[in-house]
Amino acid sequence: MSDATERVSIAIVGAGAAGLMAAIHAARTDPQAQVVLLDGARRVGAKILVAGGGRCNVTHWRVRPEDYAGSTRPAIRKVLGRYPVEAVAGFFEELGVQLKREETGKLFPVSDRAQSVLQALLDAGRDAGVDLRFPRRVHRIDHTPDGRFRIAGDRVALLADRVILSTGGKALPKTGSDGGGYQLARHLGHTITDQVHPALVPLRLREGDPLCAIKGIATPARLRVTNERGRTVAEYTAPLLCTHFGVSGPVVLDASRHLLALEEAGHPGMAWVNWLPEVDRSSFESDMLGAAGDATIGSTLRGLLPERLVGTLSRLAGLEPSDHVRSLRKDARRRLLESIFAHPLEVVGDRGYTFAEATAGGVPLSEVKLDSMESRRVPGLHLAGEILDVDGRVGGFNFQWAWASGYVAGTAAATLGYDGVAVAGR
């Protein structure tokens, strides 16, 4: 070992949500361990600060494996079960961050300030003895013959007993998540899923799409993704936002990873919008047929949909909002119903990692031991957070995965010996 190489107990690479949680619990579990937390960004916790519009939706009141995609649900359930929502809420309450539940089910800090969440984590790490170093980008990690890890990078020269990789994926690269962790994982012998693409990302529509002309319109909608055979692969109900480039909003973000996965697999799918998700189509058609003689499309949909959207949907059906519903021919009624209840989106792409909130793909969970997040391929290496092939819906689900996987990795790294067996004092 070079004189310039520093010996540490646990090195954690990546100081996002998962890395911070792992560091805190590693240091708390073994106060004698030297826990070093490295991050390449000039400011740590940037994703925490921008989450939830700057308020940070810490988690969701109800978290299920069905809220995630990527690895198998039983594997995801096992990790989430080790550190459930109640434990997360209790942890933050201990740090002085009270959480409140909003109508959407999201749990936010009572302060409505993401900074309070990040500062509490940083303070907890400092109090536990975590040595946070940034900007310190790691370029290479080698597993040495004696079972330790040699870590090299910008002002980094460490020899660690154990390593936790929590570098994130590729979403929001300006925060430091640029996919570099995948190369570190590959070098150590792990694989990355064939598909790696943005998740929770706005979608672009063809140039000139009528929805782009009504940018700013937001309304509850049901978005259904179908494969090339017409089978539904995903369906969500939440607000949809029309923008100058296409569509966004929670329902689009939730559905985007499924549509992009089909595209990545070479089997492009379709997205369909039901603009009246709480209205039964058959009942609506019956009411429309029985409407008073002076009822127009506009008056029939008044209060149900934004006025500008009514105009757009009417014209997509070759009609006008001023047309009387009782005078519509059968084919005209069908076109109108289709535009309202099964509007096809002509998606031509997405807004990329710069605007994505998460990454789909990563290291498969099958390559880690779920009770410790330790690699099945490299003893002493643990993985946590978005670098793994797990991505959740909008609403705090990805944070919950980060807290849970980080907790499991951190406590295990501070407990296990070099051979993976618990030893005295660790």
Image (tube, rainbow, N blue to C red):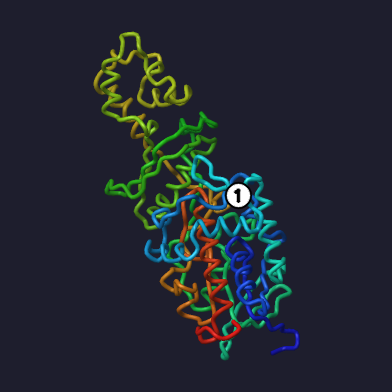
Reading the image, the residue beneath label 1 is 56
Q: Give the structural element (helix, strand or loop) at label 1.
A: loop
Place of residue 358 in the rendered image (x, y in percent of width and height, measured from the top left): 52, 55
Residue 2 found in image quarter: bottom right
Q: Residue at x 41, y 71 (%)?
A: 366
Q: Quadrant of the C terminus?
A: bottom right
Place of residue 418 in the rendered image (x, y in percent of width and height, measured from the top left): 55, 86
Place of residue 283 in the rendered image (x, y in percent of width and height, measured from the top left): 27, 26
Q: Residue extending furthest top?
A: 294
Looking at the image, residue 396 sits to the left or right of residue 4; the answer is left
Residue 278 found in image quarter: top left
Label 1: how many Cα within 10 Å (few below 14, some 14–19, many 20+): many
In depth, the one of 377 and 179 nearer the eye is 377
Identified by mark 1, the residue type is Cys
Q: Residue extending furthest left?
A: 330
Q: Is residue 196 above or below residue 163?
A: above
In depth, the one of 97 and 59 nearer the eye is 97
Q: Residue extending furthest right?
A: 3
Q: Residue at x 28, y 48 (%)?
A: 231
Place of residue 341 in the rendered image (x, y in percent of width and height, measured from the top left): 34, 32
Q: Quadrant of the N terminus?
A: bottom right
Q: Is residue 251 above or below residue 276?
A: below
Q: Residue at x 36, y 50 (%)?
A: 268
In depth, the one of 253 and 277 nearer the eye is 277
